[in-house]
């Protein structure tokens, strides 16, 4: 149990996909201009990465190592397409809100990276925990970035005004460039947090 | 079996190809199966969604009928009388085509609109589908559908901060729809 918890935990802080591994930065910029978008995207990725880790782990002994990457991509694409079809049929509004970003999940580096680095070498339960941990880390990072950008850039949080009416929101944070600068600072902050945790362990 | 032997045994191009083909085949079956199960529900939801979208645009209407001779046009009826037209329109925005669904009253006033597809900048141009920008359009006629940057001008449409091109594009799209409806009804 302790071991599985450790696998889960490392994805959130010490190996956070965005702040430490620096993977999937592009979507982190594209959909984080508001908290709700960031959260929806984070949860979608959480689901896809977990499902894909399980499926890759299940088929890991059947796949020829020479074509493993195409096979993993096929697996991710299948999962995303199934999610898309299900959303379309049962939650059309959510489907509309996610728009083209949903299809983009297929090429998220973090999902392929976890399949290659972890799920292809570990059993199903461990891979499941890894996917869950990495997905949670991704979702948490997305929400943090989204919260900063929405509060400072638009003066709202989840659509509600949180700043005084006279607040003139700087455009920069809403634009991708501002998002990049913000992520830079957050990466720095995250490093300090990770160092502190490691020090307190020692 | 050593790693080397394992490698040689699996190295033939046929084995590699069949492995990948197998993966694609399984994936195809799964997707086809899910599609088969969800297709009906999806079509049903899409139709519902379209009706709800039109209902939001013309709240008083109790029935929507297609207009003959105009692809995608609907007339909104209340107690058998046509009160408004729901017209698709499009316009060139900052990030590509913006598609709109515009509700226009028979005498050529904007009732409401909805952006159905767009690629505008998130956080700036995509606010065109929200108040306060959107609420400016209600009741305006074609001649007042013009973008201005003077905050005291209430006759025309105020541009959104940082998204003048998107503001203009949406306004032009709405204007085009209004003009088309006026052409059909003669503005009565």
Image: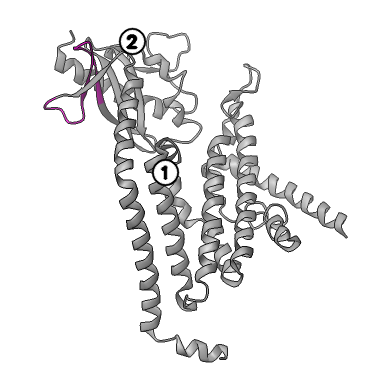
Chain for disc number 2? B
Task: Please tell me whether residue A88 is drawn above or below residue B139 in the rendered image.
Answer: below
Magenta stretch: give its range: B68-87
Q: Which residue is drawn at the image coordinates 36% and 57% (left, top)?
A: B31
Q: Which residue is drawn at the image coordinates 42% and 64% (left, top)?
A: A74
Is residue B121 among the parts visible in the rendering? yes
x then y, percent, for residue A53: 55, 62
Figure quadrant of the C terminus of chain A: bottom right
To which quarter of the image does residue A127 belong?
bottom right
To which quarter of the image does residue B17 belong?
bottom left
x then y, percent, for residue B137: 37, 15
The mark tally for this picture is 2
Packing grade of label 2 (10 A; few <14, some 14-19, many >=20) is some
Chain for disc number 1? A
Q: Which residue is drawn at the image coordinates 73% and 56% (left, top)?
A: A14
Q: Which residue is mark 1?
A: A87
Q: Which residue is mark 2?
A: B139
Packing grade of label 1 (10 A; few <14, some 14-19, many >=20) is some
Task: Please tell me whether residue B34 is drawn above or below residue B82 in the rendered image.
Answer: below
Tell me the CA gap for discs 2 and 1.
36 Å
x then y, percent, for residue A107: 47, 57
Q: Name the chief secondary structure element in magenta.
A: strand
Mark 2 element type: loop
Query: Is B180 placed left or right of A21 in the picture?
Result: left
Mark 1 element type: helix
């Amino acid at each position: 149990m302790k071991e599985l918890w450790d696998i889960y935990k490392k994805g959130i802080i010490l190996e956070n996909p965005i702040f430490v591994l620096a993977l999937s930065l592009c979507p982190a910029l594209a959909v984080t201009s508001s908290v709700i978008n960031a959260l929806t995207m984070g949860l979608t990725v959480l689901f896809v990465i977990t499902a894909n880790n399980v499926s890759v782990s299940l088929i890991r002994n059947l796949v020829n190592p020479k074509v493993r990457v195409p096979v993993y991509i096929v697996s991710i694409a299948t999962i995303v397409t199934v999610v898309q079809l299900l959303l379309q049929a049962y939650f059309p509004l959510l489907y509309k809100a996610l728009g083209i970003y949903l299809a983009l999940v297929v090429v998220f580096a973090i999902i392929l990276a976890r399949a290659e680095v972890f799920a292809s070498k570990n059993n199903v339960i461990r891979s499941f925990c890894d996917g869950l941990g990495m997905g949670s880390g991704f979702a948490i990072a997305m929400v943090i970035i989204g919260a900063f950008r929405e509060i400072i850039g638009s003066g709202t949080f989840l659509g509600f005004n949180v700043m005084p009416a006279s607040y003139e929101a700087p455009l920069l944070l809403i634009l991708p460039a501002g998002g990049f600068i913000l992520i830079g600072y957050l990466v720095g902050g995250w490093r300090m947090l990770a160092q502190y945790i490691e020090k307190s362990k020692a | 079996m050593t790693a080397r032997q394992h490698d040689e045994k699996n190295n033939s191009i046929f084995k590699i190809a069949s492995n990948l083909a197998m993966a694609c085949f399984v994936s195809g079956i799964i997707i086809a199966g899910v599609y088969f199960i969800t297709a009906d529900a999806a079509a049903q939801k899409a139709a519902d969604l379209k009706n709800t979208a039109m209902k939001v645009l013309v709240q008083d209407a109790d029935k929507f009928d297609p207009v003959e001779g105009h692809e995608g046009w609907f007339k909104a009826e209340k107690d058998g009388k046509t009160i408004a037209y729901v017209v698709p329109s499009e316009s060139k925005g900052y990030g590509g085509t913006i598609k709109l669904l515009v509700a226009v009253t028979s005498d050529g006033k904007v009732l409401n609109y909805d952006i159905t597809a767009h690629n505008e900048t998130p956080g700036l141009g995509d606010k065109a589908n929200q108040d306060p920008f959107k609420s400016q359009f209600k009741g305006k006629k074609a001649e007042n559908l013009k973008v201005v940057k003077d905050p005291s001008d209430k006759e025309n449409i105020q541009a959104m901060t940082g998204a003048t091109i998107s503001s203009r594009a949406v306004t032009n799209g709405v204007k085009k729809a209004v003009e088309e409806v006026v052409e059909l009804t003669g503005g009565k």
